[in-house]
Image (cartoon, rainbow, N blue to C red):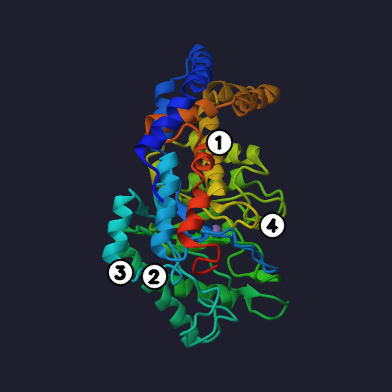
Amino acid sequence: MKISEEQLKSHNKKESEVHSRHFDEIAGRLDKNNLNIESLIQQLEQFQVTIPSWALGAGGTRFGRFSIGGEPATLGEKLDDVGLIHAMNRTSGAISLHIPWDIPDDMVAIREKADELDITFDAVNSNTFQDQKDQEYSYKYGSLCHTDKKIRVQAVEHNVQVIRYGEQLGSKAITVWLADGSNFPGQQNFRKAFERTRDSLEKIYLELPSDWKMLIEYKPYEPNFYSMVIPDWGTSFLLVSKLGDKAETLVDLGHHLPNTNIEQIVATLLLEHKLGGFHFNDSKYGDDDLTTGSVKPYQLFLIFNELVENIDHPDQPFSQIAWMIDASHNVKDPLEDLLQSVEAIQIAFARALLVDREQLEHARNANDVSLAQEVMQDAFRTDVRPLVAESRIRSGAAAHPLKLYRQLEVRKNLIKERGTETQATGL
Ligand SMILES: [Mn+2]
């Protein structure tokens, strides 16, 4: 299924009267506060959020998986789905692939298809958290940290292979997330496991093309429940600092213990120019992989507040941070969920752009705690949806992507095309 320009235009025409009213109202109000609306909308128009290939189907849990129907079964179909999202929001012009789930059969055809859909390939992800069918050695007791050198070599080679696939696709980064760790006290020598991991990562790092980055994710627990080799941002930061300029830390919002101050972690990584990118999602308890902004929208805003405060820093360009979603859908239509996630991220960004930085700085220096809170919440409580919609309309996207998605009965059409039983590779 493809969404035509006529369909987009007719949707926007129907929405235009109400949209104009809402937009004029907020534009007038912000104008009085001397905010440059045009520059704000341009920043929103340029902002892109990458869609992960593994979030386009129903993920399920370890207890069960409930098919949504019409799910993409091949890499080509996954690209088609990102193409649908991008056509509706013009904000999702990139896909992040997972190797080996998404190895292209025909590299040329896949690149051509991506070009047609105006989609680029963002960071490629390696996978040493499960065993593949034709794999010689098992990762049951770890991969890059393994006590057995043969297994470490196999895991390093896999990561290098992922870089090679990425090069052919035009990616510029590899994301490494390790499930390595231990389940019981005494099982693993912490120091040796760290050293072996560092040495393995150094070998992968040496294979990076000159214009590539290596993004290292961290996670406090799961699948290992006693210790993880890279449990927190500090350990990731230690590794990326040892590795070199091309290595940076990746912050997955779900990979923190409850109530962790993620915005402060973001501020510190920005200070050290080591913030490589994000995996956006939301959670109540752990790595819940829920829709971004659905549980803690204020936290998302506070993270963007730190990012915007640093937006003009020459040593950590805002445009070079990898903005990616990492989520899993159990009960919602994945495409609806992704549209909601991207919009929540845009809203948080727009609100952060509204923060009166001068007044905030004044309040901080004067230790006017109440005023500082007022400044922050004034921005957070502003309904910026008309600004986000305006940026979409100007980019040729839909005023209300989710509304259009339902009007066009996209899922029904996908089920008609692909059937009810399809399942994406890796799910
Ligand atoms: Mn992640």
Q: What's the distance in space between the residues labelled 2 and 3, CA to CA?
A: 9 Å
Is disc 1 placed on a helix, strand or loop? helix
Q: Are marks 4 and 1 in contact (CB under 8 Å)?
A: no
Which residue has dot 2 on it?
A: 103
Residue 32 percent coordinates (x, y): 51, 11
Mark 1 Cα-neighbour bin, 10 Å: few <14, some 14–19, many ≥20: many
Q: Earlier in the sequence, mark 2 or mark 1?
A: 2
**Relative height, residue 45 to residue 148 (above, below):** above
Residue 178 percent coordinates (x, y): 54, 69
Which residue has dot 1 on it?
A: 348
**Disc 2 residue type (three-letter):** Ile
Q: How many dots with numbers?
A: 4
**Disc 3 residue type (three-letter):** Asp
Q: Earlier in the sequence, mark 4 or mark 1?
A: 4
Is disc 4 placed on a helix, strand or loop? loop
**Front: mark 4 or 3:** 3
Q: What's the distance in space between the residues labelled 2 and 1, CA to CA?
A: 34 Å
Which residue has dot 3 on it?
A: 106
Residue 267 shows in the view:
no
Q: What's the distance in space between the residues labelled 4 and 2, CA to CA?
A: 30 Å
Nearest the viewer among 235 and 134 is 134
